[in-house]
Amino acid sequence: MNSPAILLESSVRLATKSKIVTGRSSKHSMRNELRKKTEEFLKLGGEIKQHNQGETGEPADKPRARSVFVSGEPRQTRTYINDVVNALDSRKKKKTPPKPIKVSKRPKKKIIYDDFGEAVREVWTDEPAVPKTPLND
């Protein structure tokens, strides 16, 4: 009789001629092996019991065991952090007010470029300078 470790091993070495090939056990071969073991169990006098749907192995006269998720400790009080979360969110949303745009009253030097990107001449203009903003860059 084979040991369970050998049956559950996923790869089995097969020797063919001069090279070794690694083959994987398939579902079909696992089912066949399980069927053979079941038949052997029944031949040796084993018995398989049939149960109806909804039956349980727990005794009916005793209370059910506690769930693994339920502990015997008293329930802990919870600390609500809604105020902390709201404060953090308000800090994220708070924007610094934009700085006021300073308009210079002095003339501005404007460089005129040709089609190749070379400076041709400088012109002084009285129009206010356009402030640099992330949108104008």
Image: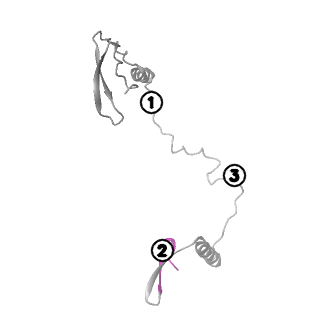
Q: Position of residue 94 (x, y in %)?
A: 40, 19
- The residue closer to the viewer here, 34 or 45, is 34
Q: Position of residue 84 (x, y in %)?
A: 40, 22
Judging from the image, what secondary structure is the residue with disc 3 in?
loop
The disc label shown at residue 54, or none: 3
Q: Say whether residue 31 is left or right of residue 93.
A: right
At 39% from the left and 21% from the top, the residue drawn is: 91
Please give the range of residues in magenta: 1-15
Judging from the image, what secondary structure is the residue with disc 1 in?
loop
At 60% from the left and 73% from the top, the residue drawn is: 34
Q: Position of residue 100 (x, y in %)?
A: 34, 12
Give the residue at mark 2: 11
Is 69 above or below relative to 16?
A: above
| Residue 38 belongs to the span the image colors magenta | no
- The residue closer to the viewer here, 130 or 127, is 127
Is 46 above or below relative to 76?
A: below
Amino acid on which the number 3 mark rests in the picture: Gly
Q: Earlier in the sequence, mark 3 or mark 2?
A: 2
Give the residue at mark 1: 76
Q: Earlier in the sequence, mark 1 or mark 3?
A: 3
Judging from the image, what secondary structure is the residue with disc 2 in?
strand
Amino acid on which the number 1 mark rests in the picture: Gln
| Residue 2 belongs to the span the image colors magenta | yes
- The Cα atoms of the two marked residues, 1 and 2, are separated by 50 Å
- The residue closer to the viewer here, 89 or 116, is 116
Amino acid on which the number 2 mark rests in the picture: Ser
Point out the residue furthest to the right here: 52
Point out the residue furthest to the top here: 105
Q: Say whether residue 112 is left or right of residue 27.
A: left
Q: Position of residue 137 (x, y in %)?
A: 37, 28
Q: Residues within 10 Å of mark 2 (few under 14, many from 20)?
A: few
